[in-house]
Image (tube, helix red, strand yellow):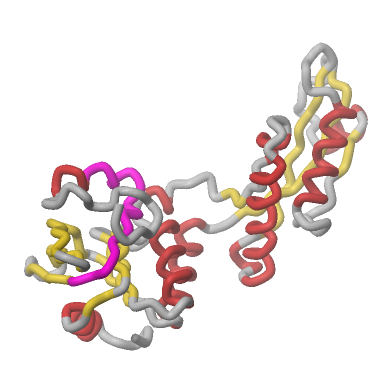
Amino acid sequence: MTPSESRATQLANAQGEVLDLLIIGGGIVGSGIARDAAMRGLRILVIDQHDFAFGTSSRSSRLLHGGLRYLAQGRLKLVREASAEKMILHRIAPHLAEPLPFIFPTYRGTEWKRWKLGIGVKIYDLLCGKSNLGKSSVLDRAGVLQLLPGLSPENLTGAVRYFDGFTNDARLVLDTLRSASHAGAMALNYLALVSANRQGDLWHCELEDHADGGRVKIRARAVANAAGAWAPGFAASRESNDFCQTTTCCNHC
């Protein structure tokens, strides 16, 4: 498949062969699965009943964070993984990962001590691969009030400043889908799953085409439910007791 192929051509191609994977949901999870699977040489179709990135993926905080709060919980592996992914995205798509500084003020009499947070944000930088989107720093009382003059000065001891990434969530989805498409995936919106039956080694899925009201039949070796908040709704629409309702790809639950 090439990005220039028409919707009708893609639909015809999808119906005329057995897919390796049908992905339900065209948000960031579904588009990410599609990109990864297509780059591994699998035959993919990702669908969405609305516009791509219509749901949660257009209503996020727009942050590419490294999980700073998990640092206090000692979950270093999770912080490292999230931070590394943030930096990878900044390297391959800098227009989707802009540096965004945060200031965390500290006050006398609270559990958040400036020296403790200062150590924490330095560790945070290291977990980002020694090259975060900006260098963390510790601010004294005068320094933070200069940056934030409207901040309450009572019992203020200073602050720490660290960086995360800011993204355009919907554009991130569309660029991921574009990359998946270049790798061979088919991506079609305004298609909704109606039913899914497992017969032998294949899933037989019926889709409703919201563009013309017709029905489309697809055969796939695996189905991934990446519909986010809409994922539980498939429990009522499925016709097979073993329909995969996880947000990860599996062949047979």
Task: Locate residue 216 relative to residue 150 in the image: left or right.
Answer: left
* Residue 232 sits inside the magenta stretch: yes
140 or 9: nearer the eye? 9
Say above or below: 17 vs 200.
below
Task: Locate residue 188 relative to residue 109 in the image: left or right.
Answer: left
The N terminus - image quarter: bottom left
The reply to whether residue 149 is in sight is yes
Residue visible at 31% across and 73% down? 20
Q: State the residue lying farthest toward the left.
A: 214
Residue visible at 16% across and 60% down? 198
Residue visible at 27% across and 75% down? 19
Give the quadrant of residue 218. Answer: bottom left
* Residue 112 sits inside the magenta stretch: no
Region rendered in magenta: 219-233
Give the quadrant of residue 219. Answer: bottom left
Say above or below: 131 vs 114.
below
Tag count: 0
Task: Locate residue 253 relative to residue 103 in the image: left or right.
Answer: left
The reply to whether residue 207 is in sight is no
Give the quadrant of residue 24. Answer: bottom left
Say above or below: 85 vs 154.
below
Which x, y percent locates residue 33? 43, 64
237 or 89: nearer the eye? 237
Which x, y percent locates residue 37? 43, 71
Residue visible at 89% across and 35% down? 139
Task: Locate residue 181 relative to residue 23 in the image: left or right.
Answer: right
Which x, y percent locates residue 248? 40, 55
